[in-house]
Image (cartoon, rainbow, N blue to C red):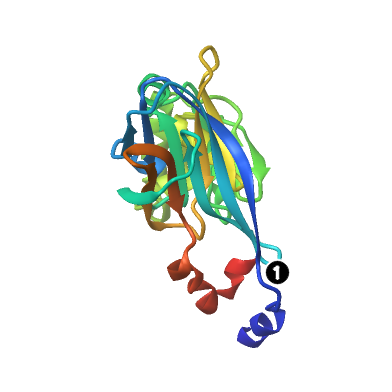
Amino acid sequence: MWNWHKRKQADEPPTIRQAMIGELHISSGTILLADPMYIESPVRIQGVPPGRYSVWGMIVRYPEGGERLARIGVRLRPGVAQARRPLGLIPVDSATVVAVDERAYQAGWREVGPARVGCLCSPAHNEQVARLIGRKFGLKSHEVNVLRSEFDEPISAEMEERIIAYLQTFPFYAEHTLFYFHVETNDTFHLVQESINDRLWGEVVLDAGSGHNLLVVSSGFGDGSYSVEGLYDSDELRCVEIEFIGPAQDKLLQAFPLLRY
């Protein structure tokens, strides 16, 4: 296996390109940057004039075919920056980072969404669990993909409790019942994850009327802690950057060559 990876490594260096990956609508004067799992503890960028700001990404493409975001930047004002200053640190456990206006977050972020989708997400057990629940409660399900099945009808909170209690009567499913069945409500975190499925970045509109949105990006090689830096001209903030792949992260390629694919 190791020899196979060595044979597949290309001699060409990676290519780097800059691309605009979206716009961020700011009305509150404050940008929040965070892992969407920990959105309540963000890095806060204050004093941003209301407006729409372009978000740019530095994209690394490896000769083996893989692409990753090395850096993103929110451009706040024109001009050339003369200095960098640290603004905070983002701990990441979901391999994603979101940028959102504070007012949009307060008004539009939903911990519980409007849906009640019963999900089976343990591929080796989906069919068996669906049969058990179907026979007991008369519910029908369908396969979404090889990893996931869903029940056809919405699952009420009362039905959810009954299904979980039933599965817990089986020793195999009792300890980690939520691995085999759970209800998704299309909360904002779920929408964020859906928007970036198989992509490097995505967008979620929090309010169609105002156009308030959030941008989500894939954090380079995944989980870790990433520094937020401000680019300044004198005391005026010109740009905010997050570097995902620097010299320290590039060392991962030596131990994990599959990251280049």
Q: Is residue 166 visible?
A: no
In this picture, residue 82 sits left or right of residue 201? left
Q: Quadrant of the C terminus?
A: bottom right
Q: Quick one: quadrant of the N terminus?
A: bottom right
Residue 144 position in % (x across, y down): 65, 41
- Judge the density around disc 1: few (<14), some (14-19), many (≥20) Cα neighbours within 10 Å: some
**Secondary element type, mark 1:** loop
Apparent side of residue 89 relative to residue 117 in the rendered image (left or right): left
Nearest the camera: 111 or 177? Answer: 111
Count of marks overlaid on the render: 1
Task: Tell me: residue 144, above or below residue 176.
Answer: above
Give coordinates of residue 21: x percent, y percent. Answer: 60, 40
Residue 66: x percent and y percent? 66, 62
Q: Would residue 235 be found to the left or right of residue 261 on screen?
A: left
Residue farthest to the top, as pictured? 209
At label 1, the amino acid type is Glu
Q: Position of residue 136 (x, y in %)?
A: 50, 35
Q: Nearer the viewer, residue 122 or 136?
A: 122
Residue at image position (39%, 52%) is: 93
Residue 182 in sight? yes
Q: Residue at x 60, y 50 (%)?
A: 147
Camera-nearest residue between 178 and 230: 230
Give the residue number, with chain letter if any, for mark 1. Answer: 64
Instruction: Say which residue appears at 47% left-offset and 52% top-offset.
Output: 95
